[in-house]
Image (tube, helix red, strand yellow):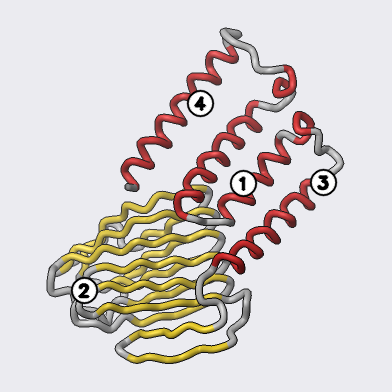
Amino acid sequence: MNRKRNVLYAILLIVLAVCLILWKLNVFNLPASVAGVSTWGLIVSVIMLLIIIHSVLDLNFAGVFIPLAVIGIVFDKPLGITAISPGILIISAVLLTIAFEMLFSKHKHFRRHRFHGEEEENAFRSEKYFESTSVDDEMGHIVHTAKFGSATKYVRTSNLISADLSTQFGEMSVFFDGAQAPGGRVNIHSQVSFGEMDLYIPKDWHVENRVSVTLGHCDDRCRNDETPERTVTCVIDGSVAFGELKLIRV
């Protein structure tokens, strides 16, 4: 799926580059209402559109409303919204993001969490904070989501195959040094938006970083790390938008 998205984004960026060149060569003219927008403004708007497409597919509300606010700032004159200041647009986008996260987050009032083979019940948690964890030991799959808060998880399983991790407007740290992967391969899907995620990878795992970054940062400290014996191949994919992902040896 990520491969198909990257191809789509690459095609759109190529089309943008060609259009900019043809525009500067006067091969075609922009509509009068858009002609006043700077070249950089147009480039930023196209990037925002890419983020919106990516976010809609992942149901990431922050990646929809905030880029829309940026587009509104760039095209305030053509849209006739010059009376609305950029600050108001950004604040409104953040408020809409929080509201939609509250409305569409599942199990807001009562959730059962299971991690490390133990279960705990959490009732009447804050509407703004959402945390959910599930572990399927038989299938070797872990899912953890944290929004508007911070969480630290220690993965302790004897049959790790895959992990699905997501954080929005928060911080997440996940330690994999207590996990065993008898299959020799682990797939980790990470999604970070407006937050930070730290993944602590065992020193004897070989890491393949396939994460796509959009207006964010991926600090891969596992890259070119010389390990005498690599027992597990760890493939990390996913996306980072307006956030940071750190891959750390432990």
Q: Are marks 1 and 3 in contact (CB under 8 Å)?
A: no
Q: Which of marks 3 and 4 is nearer the N terminus?
A: 4
Looking at the image, which is closer to me, 15 or 243? 15
- Looking at the image, is mark 4 or mark 2 nearer the viewer? 2
The amino acid marked with disc number 2 is: Met
Q: Mark 3 points at which residue?
A: 85
Q: Do the residues labelled 4 and 1 touch (CB within 8 Å)?
A: no
Measure the alpha-carbon separation of dots 3 and 4.
Answer: 28 Å
Q: Residue 147: x and y, percent? A: 54, 70
Q: Name the residue under label 4.
A: 16
Q: Earlier in the sequence, mark 4 or mark 1?
A: 4
Measure the alpha-carbon separation of dots 1 and 2.
Answer: 38 Å
- Looking at the image, is mark 1 or mark 2 nearer the viewer? 2
- Residue occupying the point 81% across, 38% down: 81
- Residue 150 in the image: above or below residue 116: above
Q: Earlier in the sequence, mark 4 or mark 2?
A: 4
Q: Mark 2 points at which residue?
A: 139
- Residue 19 in the image: above or below residue 111: above
Q: Residue 121: x and y, percent? A: 46, 91
- Residue occupying the point 63% across, 59% down: 97
Measure the alpha-carbon separation of dots 4 and 1.
Answer: 18 Å
- Residue 170 in the image: above or below residue 12: below
Label 1 crowd bin: few (<14), some (14–19), many (20+), radius 10 Å: many
Element under label 2?
A: loop
